[in-house]
Image (cartoon, rainbow, N blue to C red):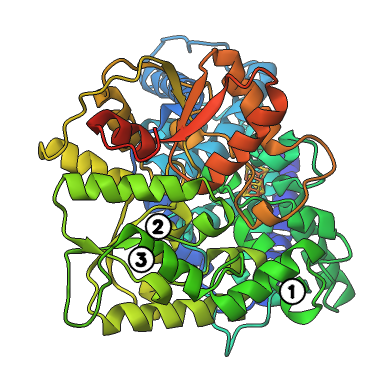
């Protein structure tokens, strides 16, 4: 009996070692396909993952479930381990029974892999109980039960352990490494792109970054990204899960065929252009996969190499390049707007505390000019020292980057940062969350280091300092639509609510999907300029959700959201009762200086 077990042991050990070695080699080769930085030391990464990096436990993403089951399973194993040291005490469960062993083992192995991932991600040490307990328990049994039957069962126990470990190995290893190398920077900062040295986007797997290839290996195919994706939910062909799985598929095909496989063969143009870059997929992926970096690389290759981008955006890009704004209105018009408002223009010699950055959205969302005028009134009422750039203000560049037109984007950013540095600007107030995110998160890469504040942050601050007084009530039931680039991407969710709650008369009701879990309006990622099809419009789904709350007024804080939801409300609501309004307009109304009522 023992001799047979020994032979099986040797066989299993060789098979498991061969399998894991082959998979590790494949994993390593897969990563070597990618571009950019030198590959990380995988072993070092795994060890550092196991050592762990503490983070706050998050109850909302299934962590509680993991905790209960893992801690429960671990506590049971620990208890059994302790009891086994007490002579003549029966085990808690009939562990002599093969069935129980298998069930405990199967469950534990699954939890071990999950716990490693979870532990690294959340820094939650209770998850480690089964990992510590299981090998100790097995060793203890070997020590105590040396009968041939006992040894046979213990070895069966190990065979199953090896089977599960080997099965989970490629994904488990990739997941851990991916978690270690997750984007630790802000969510709104895309991976830096060097026009001189990086390939112009990714046509093949080899032109992807090594991190995007690792993303493909790590994906658990759990579908959380897809379940949060507004494009998927509204019936578009895009699924972030499938994008990552197709990267994996083409990576394997490249390794098998020994020639780079095209990503465009498996990922259609429809998928690439349906993304609103809302970041819901990235935010909700338990393995920190960067879907948007992959989609951006695919857009760049389509635009920069193949010049096959959607016709609707040709004009927008040309306008950005020639006139510095997406609508092609030009510097003279921007200058006229500033003259109409009699705003102080910043020069090298006149340096107010803040630059008020309009963004180019008032040029294509005419109603938004009113919001800017209201912001000016608020700043004047609070005696804030500010100025504007007028004809020298260009688009921040965001629509070009989201479109994949990196060259135009970088030219605009350089022009802007040069101008801002030349004028000695230190603090910027932006009206649009997309300008806010780009100037705060991306401009520092281009020597543009400014203190960037969103308009709602400034209003909240002025309110706190007692420089504004909300006295005129808005007697309405109001809900709040959080813009993706304010809420989810930059965690600015409380400030807007503080402003709303300070306005007398408002009855506030949250939408079911709110704050960092808000649902996209469908305007980001250059979708403002694209026709949405097939399926519903993303904004239609959001407006239905808003209407179900019964709130006739929806507050928001972004020109894109204002335009997308506003026009959708007009088509969904014949009575014309449902409206959107910027929080800045509400604040201006309440202090008594709303420019147009
Ligand atoms: S949420 Fe992450 S792990 Fe799950 S399917 Fe999407 S990419 Fe894969
Ligand atoms: S960024 Fe938003 S729209 Fe794009 S794939 Fe992710 S969830 Fe979908």
Circles 2, 1 touching at the beta carbon (< 8 Å): no
Query: Residue 359 is drawn in which quadrant?
Result: bottom left
Q: In which quarter of the image is the N terminus?
A: top right
Above or below for 104 versus 143: above
Q: Which mark is on residue 339?
A: 3
Q: Which mark is on residue 87?
A: none
Please tell me which of labels 3 and 1 falls first in the chain.
Answer: 1
Q: Quote the CA–CA distance across marks 3 and 1.
A: 38 Å
Q: Quote the CA–CA distance across marks 3 and 2.
A: 24 Å
Work out whether residue 342 or residue 281 is closer to the camera in this orientation and state it.
342
Q: Residue at x 44, y 51 (%)?
A: 433
Above or below for 134 versus 31: above
Query: Residue 29 is drawn in which quadrant?
Result: bottom right
Task: Rate crowding at label 2 as few (under 14), some (14 to 19) or many (20 or more) other CA atoms within 10 Å.
Answer: many
Picture coordinates of residue 470 (x, y %)?
21, 28
Residue identified by numbered label 2 = 436
Label 2 beta carbon less than 8 Å to ligand 2: no
Q: Nearer the viewer, mark 3 or mark 2?
A: 3
Q: Quadrant of the C terminus?
A: top left
Label 3 beta carbon less than 8 Å to ligand 2: no
Residue identified by numbered label 1 = 303
Regarding mark 2 in the picture, which secondary structure is present there?
A: helix
Above or below for 31 versus 95: below
Question: Residue most toward the bottom?
Answer: 196
Please tell me which of labels 2 and 1 falls first in the chain.
Answer: 1
Work out whether residue 243 or residue 390 is closer to the camera in this orientation and state it.
390
Question: Residue most toward the front?
Answer: 340
């Amino acid at each position: 009996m023992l001799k047979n077990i020994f032979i099986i042991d040797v066989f299993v050990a060789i098979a498991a070692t061969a399998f894991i070695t082959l998979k590790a080699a494949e994993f390593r080769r897969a990563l070597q396909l990618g571009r950019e930085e030198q590959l990380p030391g995988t072993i070092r990464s795994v060890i550092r993952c196991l050592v762990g990096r503490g983070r706050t436990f998050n109850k909302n993403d299934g962590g509680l479930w993991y905790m209960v089951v893992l801690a429960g399973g671990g506590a049971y194993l620990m208890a059994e381990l302790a009891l086994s040291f007490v002579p003549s005490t029966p085990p808690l469960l009939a562990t002599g029974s093969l069935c129980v062993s298998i069930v405990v083992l199967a469950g534990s192995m699954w939890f071990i892999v999950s716990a490693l991932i979870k532990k690294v991600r959340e820094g939650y040490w209770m998850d480690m109980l089964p990992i510590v307990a299981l090998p100790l328990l097995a060793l203890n049994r070997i020590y105590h039960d040396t009968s041939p039957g006992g040894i046979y069962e213990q070895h069966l126990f190990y065979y199953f352990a090896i089977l599960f470990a080997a099965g989970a190995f490629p994904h488990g290893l990739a997941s851990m490494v991916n978690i270690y190398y997750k984007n630790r920077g802000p969510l709104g900062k895309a991976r830096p792109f060097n026009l001189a040295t990086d390939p112009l986007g990714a046509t093949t797997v080899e032109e992807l970054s090594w991190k995007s290839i690792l993303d493909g290996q790590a994906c658990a195919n759990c579908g959380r990204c897809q379940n949060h994706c507004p494009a998927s939910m509204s019936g578009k062909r895009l699924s972030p899960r499938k994008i990552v799985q197709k990267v994996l598929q083409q990576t394997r095909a490249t390794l098998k065929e020994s020639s780079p496989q095209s990503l465009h063969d498996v990922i259609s143009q429809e998928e690439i252009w349906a993304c609103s870059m809302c970041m819901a997929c990235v935010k909700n992926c338990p393995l920190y996969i960067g879907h948007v970096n992959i989609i951006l690389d695919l857009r760049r290759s389509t635009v920069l190499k193949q010049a096959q981008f959607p016709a609707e955006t040709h004009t927008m890009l040309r306008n950005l390049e020639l006139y510095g704004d997406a609508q092609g209105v030009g510097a003279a018009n921007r200058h006229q707007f500033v003259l109409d408002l009699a705003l102080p223009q910043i020069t090298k010699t006149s340096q107010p505390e803040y630059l008020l950055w309009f963004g180019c959205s008032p040029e294509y969302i005419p109603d938004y000019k009113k919001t800017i005028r209201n912001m000016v009134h608020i700043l004047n009422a609070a005696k804030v020292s500010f100025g504007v750039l007028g004809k020298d203000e260009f688009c921040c560049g965001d629509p070009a980057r989201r479109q994949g037109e990196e060259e135009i984007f970088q030219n605009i950013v350089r022009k802007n940062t040069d101008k801002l540095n030349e004028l000695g600007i230190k603090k910027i107030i932006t009206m649009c969350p997309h300008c806010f995110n780009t100037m705060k998160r991306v401009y520092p890469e281009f020597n543009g280091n400014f203190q960037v504040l969103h308009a709602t942050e400034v209003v909240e601050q002025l309110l706190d300092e007692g420089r504004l007084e909300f006295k005129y009530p808005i007697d309405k039931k109001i809900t709040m639509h959080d813009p993706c680039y304010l809420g989810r991407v930059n965690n600015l969710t409380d400030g807007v609510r503080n402003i709303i709650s300070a306005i007398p008369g408002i009855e506030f009701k949250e939408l079911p999907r709110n704050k960092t879990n808000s649902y996209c309006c469908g305007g980001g990622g250059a979708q403002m300029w694209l026709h949405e099809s097939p399926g519903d419009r993303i904004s239609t789904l959001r407006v239905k959700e808003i209407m179900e709350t019964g709130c006739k007024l929806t507050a928001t804080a972004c020109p894109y959201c204002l335009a997308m939801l506003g026009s959708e409300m007009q088509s969904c609501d014949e009575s014309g009762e449902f409206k959107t309004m910027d929080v800045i307009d509400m604040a201006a109304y309440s202090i008594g200086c709303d420019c147009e009522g």
